[in-house]
Image (cartoon, helix red, strand yellow):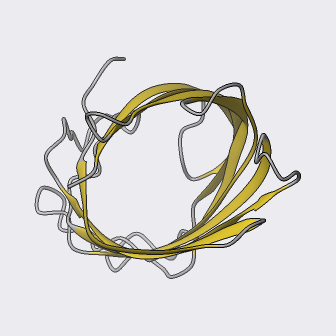
Amino acid sequence: YFGIGDIQLEPLLLSWHFPQFDLAAGYAVWAPTGDFSPDRPDVLAKGFWSHMLTFGGTWYFDQEKSWALSLLNRYEFCHEQDETGIDPGQVYTLEFALSKSFTKTLDAGLVGYWQQQTTSDRDNTGSMHDRKTGLGLEVSGLCPKLGMLTSLRYVYEFDAAERPEGQLVSLTLTKRF
């Protein structure tokens, strides 16, 4: 299946940079702009608005910052899905990356995540708490003149409960303003 996911708008992102590590905290809104279908659990779009809080950090193994380990915590507050009447539960996600910088603008590495629903859906279907885990590879490039970051990611998903699992390929474009 090929589809377009929802758009994330992040109006607030604060970051602190130190010689061996970086920290970041942010607030984002997910807008239901993607190809959502309640009959297709494999679609990328979620079909609802949500708010997300983020906090994470990166530790650099060396002075040149050529090797890095990153952890990112996300907590998502979901709103009602208009097409289904379901009010999805809140979701916690832990993302990680172990990366190598080959130049100042090109990185590659191992990436993954663990995602767990922390509260029950508010509907008539019971108290499902879905989860899934993913592990894969990512290549990212920076174009400083345009303020653009592009990343290509492949993730193999496993250990899913109440969610589809499979293989995910994503292309992410990030523009700084």
Residue drawn at (32%, 18%) of the image? 2
Task: State the image coordinates of residue 153 (x, y, percent, origin top left).
Answer: 55, 28
Q: Quadrant of the C terminus?
A: bottom left
Q: Residue 117 falls in which quadrant of the image?
A: bottom right
Task: State the image coordinates of residue 102 (x, y, percent, origin top left).
Answer: 71, 25
Is 176 situated above or below 123?
A: above
Residue drawn at (35%, 70%) of the image? 88
Is 157 situated above or below 162?
A: above
Residue drawn at (21%, 61%) of the image? 48
Q: Residue 95 falls in which quadrant of the image?
A: bottom right
Q: Residue 27 falls in which quadrant of the image?
A: bottom left
Instruction: Looking at the picture, tell me which residue is in the foreground, 148 or 70.
Output: 148
Task: State the image coordinates of residue 4 (x, y, percent, origin top left).
Answer: 24, 30
Residue drawn at (18%, 35%) of the image? 35
Is 10 situated above or below 136?
A: below
Task: State the image coordinates of residue 99 (x, y, percent, origin top left).
Answer: 75, 39
Left or right for 172, reference 140: left
- Furthest residue in direction right, as rendered: 61
- Furthest residue in direction top, as rendered: 1
Left or right for 6, reference 112: left
Instruction: Looking at the picture, tell me which residue is in the foreground, 134 or 86.
Output: 134
